[in-house]
Image (cartoon, rainbow, N blue to C red):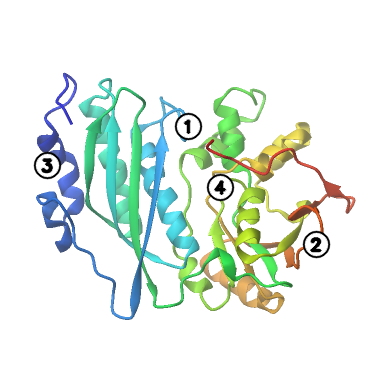
Amino acid sequence: MKQTANLPGEFELIARYFAPLARGFPGAFGLLDDVAVIAPLPGHELVAKTDAIVGGVHFLHDDPPDLIARKALRVNLSDLAAKGAVPRAYMLDIMLPKTVTEAWIAAFARGLADDQNEYGVHLIGGDTDSTPGPVTVAIMAFGDVATGRMLRRGGARAGDTVFVTGTIGDAALGLTVLRGQLANLDTNAADFLVGRYRLPRPRVRLSPRLIGIANAALDVSDGLLADLGHLCEASELAAVIEAPRVPLSTAVRAVLATHSGHITTVLTGGDDYEILFTAPPEAVNELAELSRTLDVPITPIGRMRSPSIGKQPQITVLGESGKPLIFDRSGWTHF
């Protein structure tokens, strides 16, 4: 990265703000080498995931830098969680415009440090570069899962119950708040929704406990309906979900009470980063106990079924009356 008036040189920047995040991980070599070394624990496989967030697309330009850093890390930890993997380390690529200041970098690094402490991961490498475009952050995260036990999208079975953790629609409505489209919403509700948009909650404590219970899983990033569609496609099945059973926060219910049309935003908006999974119906009691033990809501919302013949929709969403609801889109797409 070329030096700018706002920042020190690349290697000084790395030494000052990012090398401290690599302490405690021998294979990171203090970020003084070109590569890192990471090996899975005995009897485990290494799971890798990379995702990027782009200014103006996945976060707003005036979002706090520490929250941008934490969101960038957490969206990747969420994918590891959906696979049943325990996170261990990550690599960071960050592209910065010349308008970024050293104070911004310092806050960004503090955000990463906070989440490293929370999730037990270390920075082990990456790259810095300049860009004429918006801030862009790409992370590759690594985790461990017992050999042959990783949860995949394609393992669902006809008759499985569809479950989801947490609540759905908070983040999508949080973005709506930030865009000024819910100006009359109660301040506490608005703050809650914005917080869920800016800072996901990857379910890393729950995920290893789903191995042996769940048949298929993925995280909800593109939207509940879109991601359930991905699971259906990989499993070669269809699904029926009941909209009234989808778990909603008090803040989302407050929005829907006066703006019922936002049910589309809730079910298709994305950025929830909850775990969507299927399991046999007889697992419901075990999952209820797991929910209580870990204090993570787990809600059954529908079932998997064999695909229909012809051009029937892959996912059927039933409303309050039991009749199918129609949506003009299922979720977020990049292109």
Q: Which residue is mark 3?
A: 15
In primary-sequence order, the first of circles 4 and 2 is 4
Q: Which residue is mark 2?
A: 308
Q: Which residue is mark 1?
A: 57
SS of the residue under disc 4 = loop
The amino acid type, in three-letter code, at marker 3 is: Ala
In primary-sequence order, the first of circles 1 and 2 is 1
Q: Residues within 10 Å of mark 1 (few under 14, many from 20)?
A: few
Q: Can residue 131 be seen from the camera position used here?
A: yes
Q: State the image coordinates of residue 229 (x, y, percent, origin top left).
A: 65, 54
SS of the residue under disc 1 = loop
- Residue 24 has which mark? none
The amino acid type, in three-letter code, at marker 4 is: Asp
Q: What is the quadrant of the C terminus in the image?
A: top right
SS of the residue under disc 2 = loop
Vertical order, 289 against 257 (above or below):
below
* Residue located at (76% from left, 68% from top): 306
Which image quadrant is residue 240 in? bottom right
In the picture provided, is 183 more to the left or to the right than 19? right
Q: CA distance from mark 3 to mark 2?
A: 58 Å
Q: Are marks 3 and 4 in contact (CB under 8 Å)?
A: no
Q: What is the quadrant of the N terminus in the image?
A: top left
The amino acid type, in three-letter code, at marker 1 is: Val
